[in-house]
Amino acid sequence: MCGIFGAVEDAPVADLLVEGLNRLEYRGYDSAGLVTIDEGAINRVCAVGKVDELRQRLEKKRPSGNIGIAHTRWATHGAPSEENSHPHIAPGVAVVHNGIVENHAELRSALKSNGCAFTSETDSEVIPWLLARSLLSGATPARAMHELSDQLEGAYAIGVLTQQEPGVIHARRSGSPLVVATGPKGGYIASDTTALAGFAKDALLLADGDRAEIRRDGVIVYDSTGRLAHRRLVRVEGPSAAIDRCGFDHFMLKEINEQPDIASAITRHYATGDGFDDVKIDFNRLDRIRLIACGSSYYACLVARRWLAEVAGLEAEVELASEYRYAPVISHGATEIAIFVSQSGETADTLASLEKAKSLRMPTIGVVNQMFSTLARDADYALPLLAGVEVGVASTKAFLAQMLVLAHFTAHIGTIRGHRSAAARFRDGLERVAGWIAATLHNEAAIISVAEQFKNATSSLFVGRGALYPLALEGALKLKEISYIHAEGFAAGELKHGPIALIDPTMPVVALAPSGELFGKVASNVREIAARGGRIIVLGDRRAILALSDVAASALTIPACDDLIQPIIVSIPLQLLAYHVAVLRGSDVDRPRNLAKSVTVE
Ligand code: AGP
């Protein structure tokens, strides 16, 4: 997901722009660049790779100028290169863009036939050329920015500098988030408020269609009709909350260790049911719930589906957003609601699915961490994850928070639907979760020694049953996305239907096998793997590990806990295992290759 930052102050801004980009690195990117304007000259510096590469470029050539825009690019059209880096420039104009210009091909062809000399392969480069053409035809920068909505198709957030108005940063938002702010020292734009920490106390969240003009002494926002608009102020979190590792080697490890406190905060907010008061839905009239998400958030929904059946007696369908948005609609007259689960609240497929559900007149609920996101704004109801800013691209505390909020929501629905004893049992377990997480974190030393077994692995399997099958999927995702080892999650009962052909002594197999109703079945699967020479790591409580000690090469221990709560606790050793394997293999743990923190394009 690209990052945008811009600033206009009374002093040179080049270093400030790099600082702003540093704070957006967590979004994932592969190149970075900036432009300043000084005495009419547009100065561009770009670099492939990390923001530090850009910083080193500035050491050699620091552009002057008290106004500038900057960008971290996650490549969609055109490989990472200096030519494809933003800002893109056309005569008298510089632009940074987050999103995708869907109609870029026809625009590029028309502009090229008018003599526009493109220098990149990107879709974004059509934007400065459109603006330059409007300015050349006599339009003011404001007019040229306004006209973009008639020319561009697709999602975009853009920051623009013009030589005509060297004291103004122009901005527009359509589908991709953008915030603007005024601080004691100047005016700013950013993709999200984490980049503004220390520069401004509050920020304005632009709405779709908004245009803004940011000057040293203030910001003006116009809505899509061109009228002055008053937008919601959002608080900018302090610098420490967003961008400080607080002594941990990586944000991911910091965020894993924040989980006991997050679990307590979620319980305080939701356990009595008050946290759901704003959700005006009659759960007794529901035939089913549809849960829609991507990636780890989708796995959290798979866990919730079992809880909703067991605790609330409610059927749930779980859909991958990228599939749901294009799936045929069968109108069956059932009364259902759609719940969208997302850490960022900006995932393109999830947002498109939200629009589809709303078009089908389904009540919609967002379960989301970023409460200033599009999902939080556009769903009928929004339930906060209360996990704080998650910087690590691999989701840990947000994934745990998603399961916890969905768990409390299930208990709330179960109570309303008369499943009081099941709901009460579930709530009792949820009250103890923070302590169980803390106890599991204390086993980190044992997990580090298990991680050694994966250091040179080329493939790995994760197997589980019931509500732990989604955790097998999540454990495989965590490992592959930060250690780059191929890993697959399977329902343990599926092994005999093919995957068991993969078993060999070189491939670690993690079996999620805590004591409980399905332990005997999983234990049989573990023994089938052992009989074929598999190298097994059993993840379970002490009793389960003891029962399988004759076939397990090693173990990952969790405290004995209620079956319903196990998926939540099991996620902790899976996170730590992936983390330590990635550290052993020297991966960029917080910003793994090719990945973005939020996939804002499809
Ligand atoms: C999880 O570790 C990944 N980073 C990814 O699968 C993520 O869960 C997915 O992209 C969904 O993101 P969202 O929760 O912000 O919608």
Image (cartoon, rainbow, N blue to C red):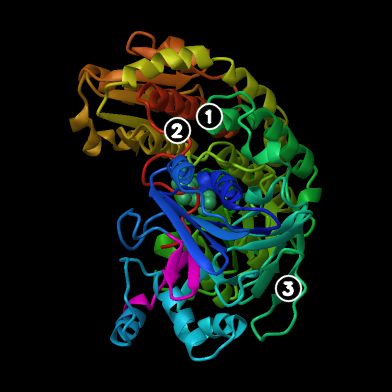
What is the C-alpha distance between the residues marked 1 and 3? 38 Å
Residue 452 lies, with reference to residue 365, above or below; the image says above
Q: Quadrant of residue 45?
A: bottom left
The x and y percentages for residue 166 are: 61, 70
Give the amino acid at mark 3. Ile
Which residue occupies the foreground of this view, 468 or 393? 393
What is the secondary structure assignment of the residue under circle 1? loop
Which residue occupies the foreground of this view, 101 or 252? 101
Q: Which residue is mark 3?
A: 220
Q: Earlier in the sequence, mark 1 or mark 3?
A: 3
Q: Main secondary structure of the magenta part?
A: strand
| Circles 2 and 1: CB atoms closer than 8 Å | yes
Q: Is mark 1 within 8 Å of ligand 1?
A: no
Judged by depth in the image, the label closer to the viewer, 3 or 2, is 3
What is the secondary structure assignment of the residue under circle 2? loop
Residue 242 lies, with reference to residue 219, above or below; the image says above
Q: Which mark is residue 250?
A: 1
The x and y percentages for residue 548 are: 39, 13
Q: Which residues are magenta?
A: 86-105
Give the amino acid at mark 2. Val
Give the amino acid at mark 1. His
Judged by depth in the image, the label closer to the viewer, 1 or 3, is 3
What is the secondary structure assignment of the residue under circle 3? strand
Q: Is residue 16 magenta?
A: no
Q: Which residue is mark 2?
A: 589
Q: Is mark 3 within 8 Å of ligand 1?
A: no
What is the C-alpha distance between the residues marked 3 and 2? 40 Å
Residue 15 lies, with reference to residue 41, above or below; the image says above
